[in-house]
Amino acid sequence: MQPILDFLGNYWWLAFPLFGVLASAGSAWERGARRRHKRRLEVLHAKAELKAAQAAARGKPVAAASLPPVTGETITQSVNDAVSAGMGGLGSAARETQTTQLERLFATHDSVTARWLEYELDVAKMIAFPAMSDGRQPLTAAYLRAKRIADGLRPASAKARLTSEELAEYRNAVADFEVAFDVAERDARRLRDSSFTEVERKRLDTAKQLLTVAIDEAATPAERQLAYRRVREELDGLISISDEAIEVLEKKVMLEIAPLASQTAPAEPASGGAAPAEPEPEPIPVKRPSTIPPPKTPPWPVPSRGTGDAPGRVVHPKPHHPGR
């Protein structure tokens, strides 16, 4: 042990050059690792670009999020791969890919909008989840802002020519739009009517029951109209109902009368000819005094009734002979 300590004490200065050698070796290894990682990313991107071009040629969309970042070297490599695989015309394939991406984004955009309209046009859902129609809720307001941004960035059609920056901006807007709606919907289903007072919750329950009567086929038209007016009165000051929602509700209330009217309406003929006239109901016979005079009693034979004869016996006069 002592010889080792003596060596380190005499040649301690050798630690500095050894440290420099080790540092340079570590730097060289790190640079090599970075180059290997960069080449690996370029290969992955080239394969993804080739796969996207082949899928676009077959008319199948490819998720843009699965592609690595684009660089000049990877673009050159993807062009070489496409040429070697016989996939010439990379520009047209890229345009087809953009079209399919826009069609997919349009479908997502329209789907979220349709889900939102269910809360905006259905009064029953408004009563059950009032936070979805309340712009004062922070999450609902965030969703409405995201919707306005996505609507403003939406191209006129799927065949519109957009730059990569415009396409990426619209893609991000649709993603924010979808996420904001999901978050607002979950929060509205969690809150329900908890933000209202006890009296206001009772009014909401009453409106929900009256709404069931207003669209009930078994109720009379007068009952449905009365229930509809009561619903409007109970919701006044609690929930802001749009004109479109009121119009949809009025149509539902009025459509319940159609089945009753169709039952009394005459059936149309199967052929294109004129409908046959329905037979008129027979009039109820009414007894009227007869205008025919009663028959006269024949003059002969005249029935007579005597004291000793039987009632109704006909008596013929005997001939009279003089001298008898």
Image (cartoon, rainbow, N blue to C red):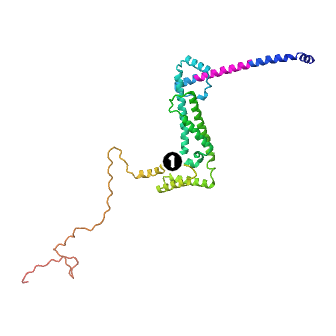
Label 1: which residue? 243
Where in the figure is residue 283, as x and y percent of width and height? 32, 60
Q: Position of residue 12 (x, y in %)?
A: 87, 17
Residue 298 percent location from the top left of the image: 17, 72
User: Identity of the amino acid at label 1?
Assistant: Asp
Towards the viewer: 279 or 37: 37
The residue at the point 71 percent across, 20 percent down is 33
Residue sitting nearer the eye, 145 or 100: 145
Give residue 2's quadrant in the image.
top right
Position of residue 215 measured from the top left corner of the image (x, y, whole percent):
50, 51
Instruction: Provide the residue span drawn in magenta.
Output: 28-49
Relative placement, left or right, of 5 versus 152 is right
Q: Residue at x 56, y 30 (%)?
A: 166
Q: Main secondary structure of the magenta part?
A: helix
Location of residue 17 with respect to 275 vertically, above or below = above
Most extreme residue toward the right is: 2
Q: Report the side of 288 relative to 85 (left or right).
A: left
The quarter of the picture where residue 115 lies is top right
